[in-house]
Image (spheres, rainbow, N blue to C red):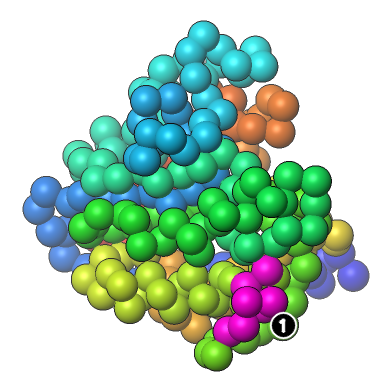
Amino acid sequence: MKTIKHLLLVMASMFLLASCGKDPMPKDIRFSVLGDSYSTFEGYVDPESNDVWYCPPPYNNIDVTSVEDMWWHKVATTMGWTLEKNNSFSGSLISNFWGYNSGPYYAPHSFIRRMDDLGDPDVIFVFGGTNDVWNGAYSGEFVYYGWTEGQLEQYRPALAYLFDHLVGRYPEAKIYFLVDMDFSTDDNQQFVLSAQIIARRYGICCIDLYDIQKDWAHPNAQGMSDIAAQVVAVLRQSY
């Protein structure tokens, strides 16, 4: 059974690479990040009031000590791109899920409540779902229109709502959804497969990230390099 599930994940990834397409490389690309703790660094989030995880000196003994260690900074350096806006908020969920201890605090800062505030980017990286998994958000059904407030507290409808809105709000931007494949376990596989299915519907490129080194459940310096290398590999196929 596990082998069959793994094959399904691989096949979904292969299909999704077609959504990445291949476009001529525009000049002076500006990119934005919509993320959670994995993408935050003190002094490099916008709005500045967003909660951050990474900050000097090393937090929780994780060796990410400067912004140059962050995955998105490494991508920018390698590709020669410029950060437009990093609207990442540590602890945030994609959905407006309230059903856990800190729900009343984090739900107002969900991805779908921040998605309008990304500036004017050529490329958008969405890196999330981690906290939906950790906090036991309900997966919900696949809903692609007429979303209710209750449905937006569930992962699948909220993710579809997010993608639908991003495509409409930023029609000229290329959108990438980064998926931490550490969650492709039997218990959490629905989150990975759902992301790939929903992304394909909206023509959004999924970048599946494997073997990210972590400390305290967060990417360490090597893990950030692991993420950046896999993102750049896909970008070089896309442009």
**Residue ID at (70%, 70%):** 154
Question: Which amino acid is tagged 1?
Answer: Glu
**Residue ID at (35%, 75%):** 167
**Residue ID at (32%, 50%):** 32
Vertical order, 125 against 153 (above or below): above
Residue 1 seen in the current view: yes
Mark 1 surroundings: few (<14), some (14-19) or many (≥20) residues within 10 A: few
Q: State the count of labels.
A: 1
The residue that label 1 is drawn on is 141
Q: Is residue 147 left or right of residue 77?
A: right
Depth order, front residue of 119/182:
119
Q: Quadrant of residue 159?
A: bottom right
- Which element is circle 1 on? loop
Residue 95: x %, y % from top left: 62, 63
| Residue that protrudes farthest toward the left in the picture | 27
Is-magenta flag for residue 171? no
Quadrant, the N terminus: bottom right
Is-magenta flag for residue 151? yes
Residue 227: x %, y % from top left: 50, 40
| Residue that protrudes farthest toward the bottom in the picture | 146
Quadrant, the C terminus: bottom left
| Residue that protrudes farthest toward the top in the picture | 57
Residue 135: x %, y % from top left: 77, 51
| Residue that protrudes farthest toward the right in the picture | 1
Vertical order, 175 against 35 (above or below): below
**Residue ID at (24%, 46%):** 84
First to last magenta residue range? 147-153
Residue 128 seen in the current view: no
